[in-house]
């Protein structure tokens, strides 16, 4: 790529247009399960930019927005994939910062608002990168696909109480995307990586362990505290803690130990405390590196259950894995990685840092469909602070430029 072409592409990134798109996306509330309106907006924006665009209707109130910029030849195709659902609804009473609300504002050179970091800002960068290529008069050899997907946030159905579209996350939209024919030779996901190239990330297995106990009126439970399922769970938690330590050591990946989060404990009836709980549930978030399969993880968890059953034979212990979302990794010398490296270097004047992260992304789904994937996105200046999500405008501009240059490098240019 000539110096003149490289500069022309970078100069074509329009700051006002980029910020306007990002702000429009933030202003449309889209908690998991309610992404249709923002998908309709994105599809319209892609159509206006000249992309062949469609809505993939996933279920009632939910859709993926897919746009394709056809290439001129037979070069490799590149997907930009970003989720449209937000981590929160904006109505949580304990999240008072403006960055937790779907009301975009500009503060100190940053866009502030729910979803700007995770990850509507990156989606706006995808579109601006394609617009910049068109404004610069560049026609790629391979196709570029922009996929705004529903249902990526870490949520999952469990039981009758937590069911329905609000709880169908963890790659729900991207699984629909690839099952229905939207694939590419490589994919960039703009999760907030602090402008680093995340070559790998952990996956997650969500587990439940339950104890059972006697169900009685409190007035008739004298002397039976040891049969209370909540009391029994205390001993189970203490027995699980050494397993957590062992797992975290054995699941070390790229120099970082694994993690197990104790995410929830549920038991009893807050509205009827005169009854003892017949069951108490412990929930674990087991972070799983891409070097450990989900089959192996399931086997390890089943062994833990058997050990607990043997230790506490009267506790009625049982359990399950109800989420298995695999991790992802890509080699540093992969063509996609090197295209991103060169694009970044041309914008920033230095190569990017590589990273491996414990959070998950839709790269885990895409890579298992044969789409090599990496995460590379803007600075997340707001989370997890009390003010919520924000992204510096300068970071959005530079990432959009990097995306455009990476697309040229990966897809090739019509001669």
Image: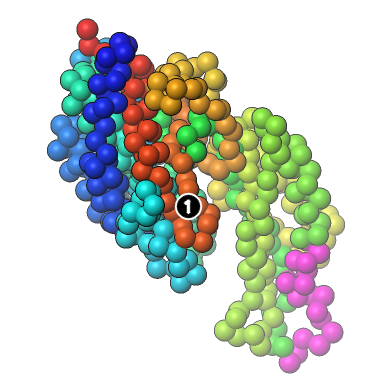
Q: What's the residue at 41%, 47% (across, down)?
A: 391
Q: What's the residue at 32%, 57% (across, down)?
A: 105
Given residues 81 and 346, the one toward you in this image is 346
- Which residue occupies the extreme bottom position in the image? 219
Q: Quadrant of residue 265?
A: bottom right
Q: Residues within 10 Å of mark 1 (few under 14, many from 20)?
A: many
Split into 4 quadrants, where in the image is the N terminus? top left
Given residues 38 and 308, the one toward you in this image is 38
Given residues 94 and 313, the one toward you in this image is 94
- Which residue occupies the extreme top position in the image? 415
Q: Is residue 223 magenta?
A: yes
Classify mark 1: helix, strand or loop. loop
Rendering coords of residue 335 (x, y %): 45, 16
Q: Main secondary structure of the magenta part?
A: helix
Q: What's the residue at 37%, 55% (across, down)?
A: 107
Q: What's the residue at 34%, 22% (across, down)?
A: 405
Judge whether residue 113 can be spotted in this image. Answer: yes
Rendering coords of residue 312 (x, y %): 82, 61
Q: Is residue 316 magenta?
A: no
Range of residues picked out in magenta = 219-236
Rendering coords of residue 340 (x, y %): 43, 23
Judge whether residue 370 can be spotted in this image. Answer: no
The residue at which mark 1 appears reads as 382
Side of 139 where 242 appears, left or right: right
Instruction: Please determine whether, in this image, residue 62 is positioned above or below residue 247.
Output: below
Split into 4 quadrants, where in the image is the C terminus? top left
Q: Quadrant of residue 354?
A: top right
């Amino acid at each position: 790529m000539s110096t003149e072409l490289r500069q022309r592409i970078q100069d074509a990134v329009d700051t006002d247009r980029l910020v306007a798109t990002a702000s429009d996306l933030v202003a449309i509330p889209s908690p998991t399960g309610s992404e249709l309106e923002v998908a309709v907006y994105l599809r319209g924006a892609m159509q206006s930019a000249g992309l062949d665009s469609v809505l993939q209707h996933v279920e009632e109130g939910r859709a993926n927005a897919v746009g394709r910029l056809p290439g001129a030849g037979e070069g490799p195709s590149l997907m930009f994939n970003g989720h449209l659902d937000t981590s929160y609804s904006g109505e949580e009473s304990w999240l008072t910062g403006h960055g937790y609300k779907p009301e975009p504002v500009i503060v100190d050179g940053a866009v502030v608002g729910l979803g700007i970091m995770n990850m509507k800002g990156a989606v706006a960068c995808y579109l601006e990168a394609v617009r910049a290529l068109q404004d610069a008069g560049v026609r790629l050899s391979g196709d570029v696909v922009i996929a705004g997907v529903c249902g990526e946030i870490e949520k999952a159905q469990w039981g009758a109480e937590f069911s329905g579209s609000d709880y169908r996350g963890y790659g729900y939209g991207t699984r629909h995307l690839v099952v229905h024919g939207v694939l590419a030779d490589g994919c960039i996901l703009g999760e907030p990586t602090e402008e680093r190239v995340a070559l790998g990330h952990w996956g997650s297995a969500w587990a439940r362990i339950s104890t059972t106990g006697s169900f009685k009126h409190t007035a008739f439970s004298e002397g039976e505290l040891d049969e209370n399922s909540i009391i029994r769970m205390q001993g189970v938690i203490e027995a699980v803690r050494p397993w957590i330590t062992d797992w975290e050591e054995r699941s070390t990946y790229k120099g970082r130990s694994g993690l197990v989060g104790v995410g929830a404990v549920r038991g009893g009836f807050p509205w009827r405390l005169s009854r003892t709980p017949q069951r108490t549930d412990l929930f674990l978030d087991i972070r799983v590196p891409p070097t450990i399969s989900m089959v192996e993880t399931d086997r390890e968890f089943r062994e833990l259950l058997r050990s607990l059953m043997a230790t506490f034979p009267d506790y009625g212990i049982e359990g399950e894995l109800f989420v298995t979302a695999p991790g992802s990794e890509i080699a540093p010398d992969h063509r996609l990685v090197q295209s991103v490296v060169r694009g970044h270097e041309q914008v920033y004047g230095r190569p990017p840092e590589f990273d491996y992260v414990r959070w998950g992304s839709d790269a885990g789904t895409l890579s298992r469909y044969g789409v090599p994937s990496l995460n590379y996105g803007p600075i997340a200046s707001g989370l997890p602070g009390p003010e919520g999500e924000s992204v510096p405008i300068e970071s959005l501009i530079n990432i959009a430029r990097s995306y455009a240059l990476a697309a040229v490098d990966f897809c090739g240019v019509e001669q």
